[in-house]
Image: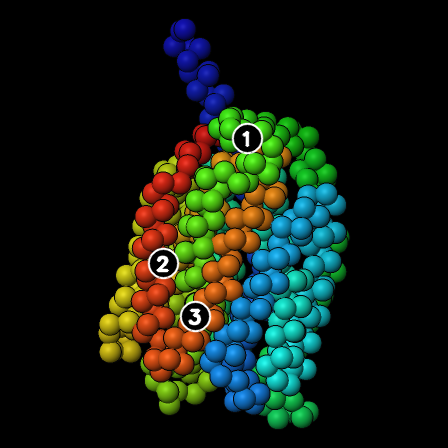
Amino acid sequence: MTRCHIANAATSTAAAEDRYQHVCKKISKRLIGFLFVCFVLSFLDRINIGFAGLTMMGDLGLTGTQFGLASTFFYIAYIACGIPSNIVLARIGARRWIGSLMIAWGLASTCTLFATDATSLYLLRMLVGVTEAGFLPGVLLYLTFWFPSAYRARANALFMIAMPFTAGFSSALSGLILGLDGIWGLKGWQWLFLLEGLPSVVMGCVVFSYLDDRPQQAKWLDSEEQALLHHALSADRASGSAAATQDARSVWRELASPRILLFCLVYFCLVNTLAMIAVWTPLIVKSFNSVSSNQSIGLLAAIPQVCTIILMIVWGLHSDRTRERRWHLVLPMLMAAIGWILTAVSSYPAMQLLGVCMAASGSYSAMSIFWTTPDQALSFNARAVGIAVINAVGNIGSAVNPLVIGWLKDLTLSFSSGFAYAATLMILGALLALRLPISTPEHQP
């Protein structure tokens, strides 16, 4: 081959790479921002009970165990409905299903203001769990229809920063809303569920007119862009399916394979910390200084989330640029474990807050990397159910954690034993992650 031919080939490859990057950025601008807002509302309706608990526990006469059990019931319903929800999404499309889910969970979350005792709270939180179950695994599946694996860590990170963003934003917002206590005869926590639940209903209506189920239906992509994306996704699917289907005679046998069980176990360990941050952060921060006002607690609880957003973006971008996944998953999990240990052993509020920052930043960054990997270990036919299975089994940690932490707090009158529990699971999860069947993302296009 002559130098001229080599130069022309290099120029052609560079031009194709530029077009590929342009298409991915165009999709990101169109979808990620919108899905980010949807996830903010979803996560807000999931975690606002943590701030409601600052006053709800006293108003309803709940113990720490009962309050934790409300979140446990939420996740029991969430786990039970996640798999069938993803199956429905794969059949009828994301636009109709996600829109319907948002309207349903918005109404269910709003109705939590009518809780009068532990039993009614359990039932209402289960209803929220049923309706919200399909959103996260559904969107994770949806993103595999639009983003090839080489681009997905940054896409996942930009989408999933909705979780720390919401936790930080709601920390300040919820503290202010609790100050509405007594207006129109409603308690502050009742205002919380009302004002943070109804926006999901409105956004659910918007989903019906905004989302496209597949790239082929997207009128905002021209034919060349659709062809380029189809080529990249097909190559992605072929490279992943070759490894995933070697010992899979059926979808269900594939889902019961040891590699999928390993993904479930790693996610279970990771989710315990995610659940602890989501539900207990306000009460953990309050334990550092019991005389702080709800507004001060809200502002302090926002600090770990700001740190998390920064690390998630930087870490996801670095993982895509280096095309490395395994250590980008393991290292932040170990960082989170160190954070919990620091929070447990220190008696200084500033050091304890630093520990929470490390735990939050590490666990959320690990999660955004984690969800770039399962689809490469699954055949295309098993992907919808497989992602839902991993999410459902892993989220048993979300059901177990609030109950365990609430019980440990009632038993020891401190969160320290809960911190040790979370740290142990993160170390175990990091060790298991070293054995995950993680492949290197193919260079695109």
Q: Nearer the viewer, residue 416 or 144?
A: 416
Q: Nearer the viewer, residue 9 or 288?
A: 288
Residue 108, quarter of the rendered image? bottom right
In-image side of 331 versus 126 (left or right): left
Q: Position of residue 246 (x, y in %)?
A: 51, 26
Instruction: Measure the C-alpha gap from mark 1 to mark 3.
Output: 37 Å
Q: Would you say residue 241 is visible in this rendering? A: no
State the CA–CA distance, disc 2 to disc 3. Answer: 13 Å
N-terminal of the pair, mark 2 or mark 3, is 3
State the separation of the CA atoms marked 2 and 1. Answer: 30 Å
Question: Between disc 2 and disc 1, whose residue precedes?
Answer: 1
Q: Position of residue 4 (x, y in %)?
A: 42, 10
Tag 1 residue = 248
Which label belongs to residue 425?
2
- Return the residue at label 3: 404
Q: Residue at x 43, y 76 (%)?
A: 407
Task: Report x, y in % for residue 190.
Answer: 62, 83
Circle 1: residue type: Ala
Residue at position x 64%, y 56% from top?
81
Assign a secondary structure to mark 3. Answer: helix
The reply to whether residue 331 is in sight is: yes
Q: Percent x, y for residue 50?
A: 51, 75
In the image, residue 192 above or below residue 82: below
Say which amino acid is labelled 2: Leu
Tell me the element at label 2: helix
